[in-house]
Image (spheres, helix red, strand yellow):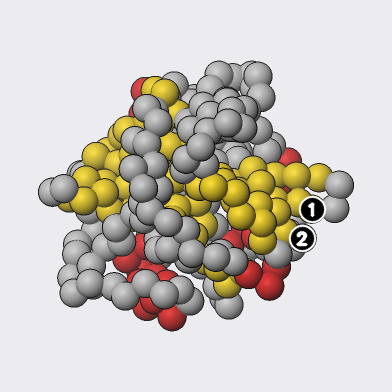
Amino acid sequence: MNPALIFVLFIAASSGRSFPNRRIMNGIEATPGQFPHQVSLLLTFGEQTMHCGGSLISHRYVLTAAHCLDRSEGGYVLIGAHNLDENVEDHRIRIDFTPDDYNIHEEYFMISMRNDIATLRLSSDVPFSDYVQPVHLPRWTDGDFTDYTGTIAGWGQYQDPSTGLSAVLNYITNPIYSNEWCKERFIMGMLIEDQNVCMSGANGRSACVGDSGGPVTVQVGPNTVQIGVFSFGPASHCLDEIPIVCARVSYYLGWIQANSDVIIEM
């Protein structure tokens, strides 16, 4: 088999199945309510479970990665959570879901992680509060966000080797790369296409396997805008400054609007 294809298979399989406990590296603990759009998804695959991230985009819909939901038998989403061990958080909302609630991109291809984007329809409207708010999506006219400061948050591995999930939400910030810059620094630059956006993994600040589906955001004036859905990157050695590669949200605005109740702004 072609060595390049082996590497792509390793990334795809690892990000979806093999290392479910890896998360934000060298992160900072968030304050409760700092990321009110952040959601936690626990998915079941037979007797196994997997944790993914996602973002609330309306009262009824969550945006995440296709490879998180693909072949899952269902699970539940936590919205408004900070400490996953604290069942007494009164601002936390839990909603169960089944495969009937999934909208996986019809051209999603696991081997090369193409079109790695999905929406999840919740069974009931989520009320907004200080701890629960939808993220803003890019407008049709926005640019590519190169050189903005990106943020990604998640629960789980905060040192290597893994000590398991982090109880609390952590986050990192790093620059957003141009795709040309990213291609030069990613081990398989041919995987970086217009449908992708990259965030730096410099200084050991990185997402890792298992943060799949989590939102990469930038600040545009007063608005937190989601520009990426974490898709793939380091399959191991998450401190090695490998770029974080995402599905580019602006590339999929039409698909998101058609597969949710969100109306994209001009």
- Return the residue at label 2: 73
Q: Position of residue 36 (x, y in %)?
A: 38, 44
Residue at left 18%, top 70%?
141
Instruction: Relative to 173, say whether 249 is above or below.
Output: below
Q: Position of residue 160 (x, y in %)?
A: 59, 19
Q: Position of residue 170 (x, y in %)?
A: 45, 29
For the residue marked with disc 1, what is the amino acid? Phe
Q: Look at the numbered discs 1 and 2 and tell me whether their residues touch, using CB distance below 8 Å.
A: yes
Q: Earlier in the sequence, mark 1 or mark 2?
A: 1
- Return the residue at label 1: 45
Looking at the image, residue 82 sits to the left or right of residue 35; the answer is right
Spatial CA distance of label 1 from label 2 is 6 Å
Q: Which image quarter is the C terminus in?
A: bottom left
Neighbour class for label 1 at 10 Å: few (<14), some, many (≥20)? Answer: some
**Residue 74 quadrant:** bottom right
Neighbour class for label 2 at 10 Å: few (<14), some, many (≥20)? Answer: some
